[in-house]
Image (cartoon, rainbow, N blue to C red):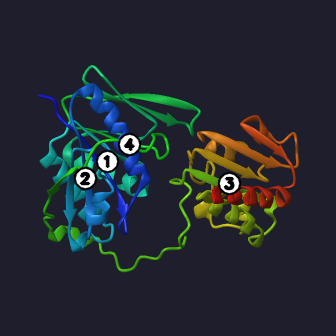
Amino acid sequence: MTKDIFVFVEQRNGAVLSAGLQALSAATQLAGKTGGNVVAGIIGHDLSAAAGKIDNSGATAVYVCDAEPLKNYNALKYTRALAGMIRKADPQIVLLAASFMGRDLAPRVAMRLDAGLATDCTEVDIEGGALIARRPIYNGKAYSRVHFNSGRVQIASVRPNTFPLPSGGGAAERIAFAFAADAADDRQVTKEIARTGGEEKDVTEASIVVSGGRSLKSEENFKILYDLAHALDGAVGASRAACDAGYQPHSRQVGLTGKTVTPQLYVACGISGAIQHLAGMRGSRRIVAVNTDAEAPIFKVADIGVVADLFTFVPLLTEEVKKVKGH
């Protein structure tokens, strides 16, 4: 009997995470080989609008777990809800985004379901009726190929921006899933949620990242990068040197000791290209480097290199982007 492919689509304050929709695209590719359907699941509170954003994405049905206790993310409650939803859907394969929430949820759910798990996958396929996944190791210097046991539920988290956004399909059937609260979940209590990044996008989830190095010289000078990032609808990143100097918070650090990013476009401004930094952004689809040093190592990995003063070039680029978008 052919089983379906289940995708957990993450939402935050009613906004559906793009990486969750990208996982639906990966699931649609797999469903073409397994013969099963793609079904989605969403968890939270007041989900009518969020669930509607899953329509026309390839899913035939959406399991909706809508309850007030699920308004804010709680690892124990979300694990209970997602594990129960998967048991009800009874899929062969489960996909979810390798976001902060996905990284927390995936191993917890896999443990409850006695399922196989591969994290941060960049490719998924079917071989011999079972899921196989390709995932980077050693900071992208090598890849491992994971083979799943077809006799168990197979769970994989997929790296953001490695699959396209889905297109096609019609409205998905809504299936209500009741949240069964448990006293044990109260061991974890969320007293306060502090958002330190404001409305800025997280570098690990943005499709465009504009990063700056120590040559920006101050936190105030990073404004020119924020202007470009906002014009491109992207996020701002920084090198370790810039973060250590206090120009940007470490939550925006890209590199071996920071975050790994895989955007469609990575713009490195005033970044020399130390190995530590390259380890965090080498998976970017297109890399543009701006540096006054024509011999900077960053140019060896860049698709487009610009030898120029970033303080002159970046504002000009921002204005050109605004002009193009204004047409």
Q: Nearer the viewer, residue 104 or 7?
A: 7
* First in sequence: mark 1 vs mark 3: 1
* First in sequence: mark 4 vs mark 2: 2
* First in sequence: mark 4 vs mark 3: 4
Residue type highlighted by circle 2:
Gly
Q: What is the x, y in percent for residue 227?
A: 69, 65
Residue type highlighted by circle 1:
Asn
> Which mark is in front, 4 or 2?
4
Q: What is the x, y in percent for residue 58?
A: 30, 42
Q: Residue at x 37, y 44 (%)?
A: 23
Q: In the rendered structure, are the residues bearing label 4 and label 2 in contact, judged by CB atoms less than 8 Å apart?
A: no
Q: Nearer the viewer, residue 227 or 213?
A: 227
Q: Is residue 285 above or below residue 322?
A: above
- Residue marked by disc 2: 41
| Disc 3 packing (10 Å; few <14; some 14–19; many ≥20) | few
| Disc 1 packing (10 Å; few <14; some 14–19; many ≥20) | some
> Which mark is in front, 4 or 3?
3
Gap between marks 2 and 3, in whole Å? 38 Å
> Which mark is in front, 1 or 3?
3
Gap between marks 1 and 3, in whole Å? 29 Å
Residue 111: assigned label: none
- Residue marked by disc 3: 324
* First in sequence: mark 1 vs mark 2: 2
Callout 3: SS: helix
> Which mark is in front, 1 or 2?
1
Residue 167: assigned label: 4
Gap between marks 4 and 1, in whole Å? 6 Å
Residue 56: assigned label: 1
Callout 1: SS: loop
Q: In the rendered structure, are the residues bearing label 2 and label 3 in contact, judged by CB atoms less than 8 Å apart?
A: no
Q: In the rendered structure, are the residues bearing label 4 and label 1 in contact, judged by CB atoms less than 8 Å apart?
A: yes
| Disc 2 packing (10 Å; few <14; some 14–19; many ≥20) | many
